[in-house]
Image (cartoon, rainbow, N blue to C red):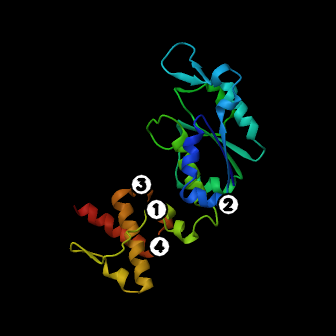
Amino acid sequence: MKYSILTLFPNIIKSYISESIIKKALEREKIELEIIDIRDFTTLPHNQVDEYQFGGGRGMVLMCDPVVSAIESVKTENSIVVLTSPQGKTWNQNIAKSFAAEYDHIIIVCGHYEGFDERILKYIDIEISIGDYVLTGGELPSLIMLDSITRIIPGVINTESHEQESFENNLLDYPVYTKPHDYRGDKVPEVLLSGHHANIQKWRDEQQLISTFNKRPDLIDESKLNKVQIQLLENLRKSKGDK
């Protein structure tokens, strides 16, 4: 997998990728990453890449030429071009998985200032948002996409680790505990200390569903539940209806 991140602030990207999972993926040659400074593609003095908007209004707008030139400098037939934008499709785990499976080269264009010249969209394949709020720029969204895709790539982390995480099978993760066994009278569930793997797995399956039912019921997809979870879901719904 290759990433090309187009940004006005390369150091933000560099500081993040020097740590944690991205650094390991780079060292293991599971991914390639290039950081493209959009300013390198301007033809104007003083590295200017923005201008006042036609029609008046507050804020500066990124111009077409440097952004499109930066895209064209790295784009190939196998690339997908992503624009970070509050108007885009909301990022989620399923999209991350599809990107990891379907694409060999992901170009991420980081927005900034008041926005882009609208004509840039003709050179974009998909707009992506990380939520319904506004950020100063697209560097944080680009890093979120980079991180969530990379950790799915085989060999980056242990496969079992991400298969049991939140949002896999449309459920949140189960509770986890470590030492001490008793913290101020709050004890670790005994089943986790039993050594009985089947009972532990049953408990975890139940807890995933209970957590999702209480916190994010919109995620639940009954077609992905096992028989025990389906029965538990019915009981949870009855219990809620009794209140």
Q: Residue furthest top?
A: 55
Confirm or deny contact between disc 2 and disc 1 (CB under 8 A): no
Q: Which one is in front in this view, the residue at disc 2 or the one at disc 1?
A: 2
Q: Mark 3: which amino acid?
A: Asp
CB under 8 Å between callouts 2 and 4?
Answer: no
Disc 3/disc 4 C-alpha distance (Å): 18 Å
The residue under label 3 is 218
Say which residue label 2 marks: 30
What element does badge 3 sit on?
A: helix
For the residues labelled 1 and 4, the Cα–Cα distance comes to 17 Å
- Residue at image position (57%, 23%) is 61
Left or right: 80 in relation to 238? right
Q: Earlier in the sequence, mark 3 or mark 4?
A: 3
Residue 229 position in % (x across, y down): 41, 71
Mark 1 lies on residue: 166
Mark 2: give few (<14), some (14-19) or many (20+) Cα within 10 Å.
some
Residue 89 visible in the snapshot: no
1 or 3: mark nearer the eye: 1
Disc 1 is placed on an element classified as loop
> Residue 74: percent from the left, percent from the top?
74, 41
Residue at 69% in and 31% down: 40
In the rendered view, would you say 28 is above or below 110? below
Label 1 vs 4, first from the N-terminus: 1
User: As rendered, which of 75 and 243 lies closer to the eye?
Assistant: 75
Q: Residue furthest right?
A: 77
Which one is closest to the eye, mark 3 or mark 2? 2
Residue at left offset 65%, top offset 57%: 26
| Quadrant including the C terminus | bottom left
